[in-house]
Amino acid sequence: MRGIHVERGRVCTIRGDLRMALAAVVVIVASSSAWGTPFTWGEDEEGDTIAPLRWPAGSTINIYIEADPDPAPPDRSALLREGMLRWQAEMANRGITINVTVGDPPNPPPANVVRCTWEPNGTQRGGHTLGTGAGQDDGIGTCSGDTELDGGEIVIRDGLPAGTDAERDYIRNLGQHEVTHVLGLADDEDGQVTDHTQGTTPNTYNDTDRAEISSLYPVQEQQPAQGTGETEQSSNPNRYDWDFYYDGPPGGHVALITMEVPGEVISQIIPPPGWIALNPGDPGRLSLSYPFYQGYCEDGAPGRPPWDANYRVPLAFRALSAAASLSMGHPSVHVTLFTVGAQRGPMRAWAGGPEQVLEGPVAPSPSVPALGLIGWVAMGGALVGSGAVVCRRLGAEGRRRRESRAA
């Protein structure tokens, strides 16, 4: 569903023994470029939540569909392929190539392989189950990767009928829809291709579909949709208010906002009207029945799902409809948060554009002085001037180093 473009400016911290020794942290902005999706959030080497993930620009995604286990015509694998190929033209001018083949990958396989297989009722991926019962699915799509997407999987219920034109069109639509999740996009009830509920009329991409796709994979040279955030000052040390203003093309929207807020300090969340929150401190977020996931993660399972107990998620807000999203027609949204035991400091936030550093709540630490954002910036400038800052650079340059080491 919702997507974010991120030119990442990072608040870097001195960690581990350095933090204990220096009792101070950071503050500089390191430039790099990355894009993100709200469907799956990554982690950096140190376990910190970072911007959502996407396939890198210029990627070729190679989808291989298992041969139909039912030898009787029609060939359901060929029908899935026809639906998936509808993405080719849509993604071509977004820097992504999609190849779809019926059969097994060659040996050795190419990069960026996504397998699509036929599986029996009861098969599970990421908490989702194939079957005909309530809450079960005909297909499940996944995506995976560490700092960017590089793989995925699609499983299709092997009992799908294909005896009528309507049933055949449904299989085409289902195949097209599951690629939504391979691309890192979640379900959107206002979309047609991105809608979890698929019908028997051949799909076309509607305005919501294209806004969602563009927010994650903009048309080349297109300005990404983004929201610029501001922190309001408050006399209540436990209250935080932020305003986000739309700054993007007329046809775009921002439907996801994430903030790096530790769950243990959150007391009360007041999302914008028409939006819903994911509270990282709420035990309920470990269940797929959590309200945030409804209509959003219906048949997809990202590599690091937010319902995984081992994954530290950010505070997140998503729009419940295209009309509530941040856009030219709805140019601002307001977020309020109450905390307990937090101190003010630099907080990373994403709202479709560059990663932002805003003043927000951070977990208290006896080794870190309680400074406002201006104080942190001043300290960072002094440390930079004295050559005492240690900052891990991320993004394109960091990726090149990792690729060089891997080679």
Image: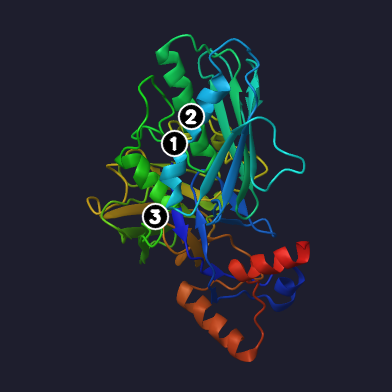
**Cα distance in 3D space between marks 1 and 3:** 17 Å
Instruction: Report which residue position mark 3 lands on.
Output: 219
Where residue 58 appears, as percent x and y from the top left, is 54, 56
At label 2, which amino acid type do we have?
Glu
Q: Secondary structure at mark 1?
A: helix
Q: Could you tell me which residue is drawn at 51 percent across and 19 percent down?
A: 135
Q: Can residue 58 be spotted in the picture?
A: yes
Tag count: 3
Q: Residues within 10 Å of mark 3 (few under 14, many from 20)?
A: some
Q: Quadrant of residue 235?
A: bottom left
Q: Residue at x 65, y 81 (%)?
A: 389
341 or 253, which lies in front?
253
Question: Where residue 38 sits: x, y (%)?
Answer: 48, 47
- Can you see residue 290? no
Q: Which residue is the site of mark 1?
A: 86
Residue 306: x, y in percent?
A: 57, 41
Q: Is residue 98 left or right of residue 69?
A: left
- Which callout, 1 or 3, points at the residue further toward the start of the chain? 1
Name the residue that disc number 2 marks. Answer: 82
